[in-house]
Structures are given as structure tokens and as C-alpha cells.
Image (cartoon, helix red, strand yellow):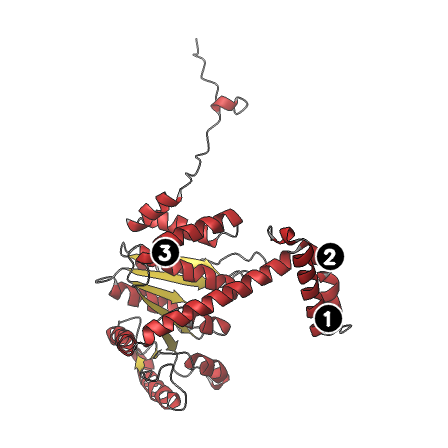
Amino acid sequence: MTKDLPNHSNSNPENRPKTPTRRSFSIEDYIAGIRQADRAILGRAISLIESNRPDHREQAQSLLLALLPETGRAHRIGISGIPGVGKSTFIESFGSMLTKEHRVAVLAIDPSSSVSHGSILGDKTRMQHLASDPRAFIRPSPSSGSFGGVTRKTRETILLCEAAGFDIVIVETVGVGQSEAIVAEMVDSFLVLMLAGAGDELQGIKRGILEVADILAVNKADGDNKPLAERAQREYTNALRLMRPTSPSWKPPVLACSSIDGAGLSAIWEQLQQHRQTLESTGEMAQKRAQQQLRWMWRMVEDQLLYTLHHLPALRTVLPTLQAQVQTASITPTLAAEKILQIFLSTLATSPESLAGT
């Protein structure tokens, strides 16, 4: 006689496998975990900061306020470069060298999909060795097409990493353009990677990057490419003489390096340390960070106002028409902007409570 098997049919709710629920953390849990350098809790805290939910944003600000006294001691380094320069390979080699004596956090601002606005999140696969290093922490951050969002999320993530004990925080930019200036406003030292023989068509991009650079490094200075890299090093040194430096007490050096064999990486680190020490000795570092805080505040004001305008119920019905009129030159952009601001100010005066949910 065959023994009856137990019935595990999903028709019985009691027999259905239970989906594990994610534990919710209190502010105290986050604070304790970050102070203990718990990487999982740090990751959860960064997700809290990246959330646009009003309750999450309120929690995130409470968390940051509690941790502020434990922030500000890390060396904040921005790293950028033209496409194909090898930023990820450089950070992998450079970060692995630094973790011998330091704890390194890498915040990589990813370009977002134009369709989903999601992050590509490829950095952990491109930096496999560094990602597995217990003294390193890699966090890709979606830009979501908003540089204001980048500013808020990345700046606040820097603070969390500092509170967790990371004494070097590297911010990798998406590439070229507006992101360079924004990242330069949130770091102590801005390192720009260059290529030898990139072509005259990139000169305009190079100039924009050079204007915010504290240190330049010609990457891929190895093998047959080494003579080209050394020649480019001389050319960039001459080019920098025609530009105003970022600090009156610092002349940006131009170095050559190889992410493959590690040549020049220690020299770059020495220059980064020297740059920070120079600014600290002249008082420029404290002034620079104070100015960064003020610019951060105003960028957040601008970002929140823009967000509020886009989500204001009174504007949703008229925005498509105004945008279409601007596109077809039926009205001027200035007049359309004035109409948008009039609706905003009218809403603020008559029903300010409607702005609370935006």
C-alpha cells in the first residue's frame, strides 16, 4: 500500500512558501551599523538617501544630521577623463594600491538609460578585484538625467562613507561635459586622465576639463604607446601654462601612468597628497569646502524648485500646451517661463498646501 504524500499544493495558503520580508531599520540601527562599518547597512543607508519618497528623504536627513560630526575627514578625489581613457581600469589599479594602507570608497556616477532612467551599474563587473577587497566599497549611482540629483545623492553618499570610516572617497564622473564642473565642486582634488593622440576633434572637450583639473595624468603609458604618452605629457604641460590654475598656490602637474603595470600610480598619489597639504597649509581647503557647502545648498534649492514645478497639479494641464507652443515658435521661451512662474506664485498664494505633496 502506497503511503500518502503530504499535500504541498499552493491552493492552501498555509503551505505556500513565505517570501522573506526585508527588515526595516530605525535611524538608530543605521547609525550603529555605519559606525561599525557594516557594508550591508551602509548600502541600505545609501538607498535611503537615493529614494525620492518624502518619508525616506526625511529619514535620510535625520540620519545625516546625526552623523555629521563624524564626516569631513576623508580625502575626496574626483576622477574624470575623455571616453576610452580607461577610468575604470585606472581606479581598479589605483584603488587596489591605496587599500594597502587606506579604506577606499568609490562612487561611480553612471549614465542613465534614456528609456528607463535606470543605472547601468557596470562598475562592480569592471572593477572585480577592487569590488572583492574588504577595504574597498564600490557604489554605482544612477544620474537619472538630473545633475541636481547627482549633486544631492553623491554628496550625501560621500558623508555616509566618511562616517563609515573610509578615509579616501573617489568620485568617478560619467565622462565629459557638465558633470566635470559639478563633481569638481564636491571634491578636494580633481584628477583628469588623458590619452596620447586623442585627436584634434577633442580639443574643445579637453579645454573644458583642463580648466577644473588639479592634476593631469596621461594614461596607457606602456608598451609601444609609452613614447606617445611622454610626448603628450609635454604638450599638456605647455598647454596648462596658458590657463589659470584652480588655486594661486598650486600649479597642476602632468604625469604619465599605466593602469596595466602600475607605473606612475604612486607618483599620482604623492601629488594628490601634496595638493591637499598645500591647500590646507594656506587655508584654502577650509574655504573651498565652505564654498562647496553654500553651492550645494543653492543647487538643492534649484533642484527642489524645478521638481516642484514639474509635479505641480496646476501646471500639469498647461505644460504640454506651453511646451508645444515654444517648440512651434508660437510664443517665446521667456513668455512661457513667465506663465509657468505666474501659475506657481498664484498657487503659492492661494493654496500653499497643494505644494506639500510635490
Disc 3 secondary structure class: helix
Q: How many marks?
A: 3
* Quadrant assignment for the N terminus: top left
Residue 255, quarter of the rendered image: bottom left
Q: Nearer the viewer, residue 147 or 140?
A: 147
* Residue in view at x 30 percent, y 74 percent: 258
Count residues near mark 1 (Cα–Cα under 10 Å), then give few for <14, some for 14-19, many for 20+: some
> Can residue 75 be seen in this snapshot?
yes
Residue 33 versus residue 93: which sits nearer the camera?
33
- Three-letter amino acid code at the position of disc 1: Val
Looking at the rendered structure, the kind of residue marked 2 is Thr
Circle 2 Cα neighbour tier, 10 Å, few/some/many (<14 / 14–19 / ≥20):
few
C-alpha span from label 1 to label 3: 43 Å
Residue 37 visible in the displayed image = no
Mark nearer the N terminus (3 vs 2): 3
Label located before the other in sequence (1 or 3): 3
Identify the residue at image location x=32%, y=57%.
Answer: 69
Residue marked by disc 3: 160
Residue assigned mark 2: 317
Distance in Å between CA atoms under marks 2 and 1:
16 Å
Residue 326 is tagged as 1
Residue 106 point in image, percent of width and height: 36, 61
Residue 135 in the image: x percent, y percent? 27, 56
Quadrant of residue 334 within the rendered picture: bottom right
Left or right of 267? Residue 188 is: right
| Label 3 neighbour load within 10 Å: few <14, some 14-19, many 20+ | many
SS at circle 2: loop
Q: What's the amino acid at mark 3?
A: Leu
Residue 66 on image: x %, y %: 36, 52
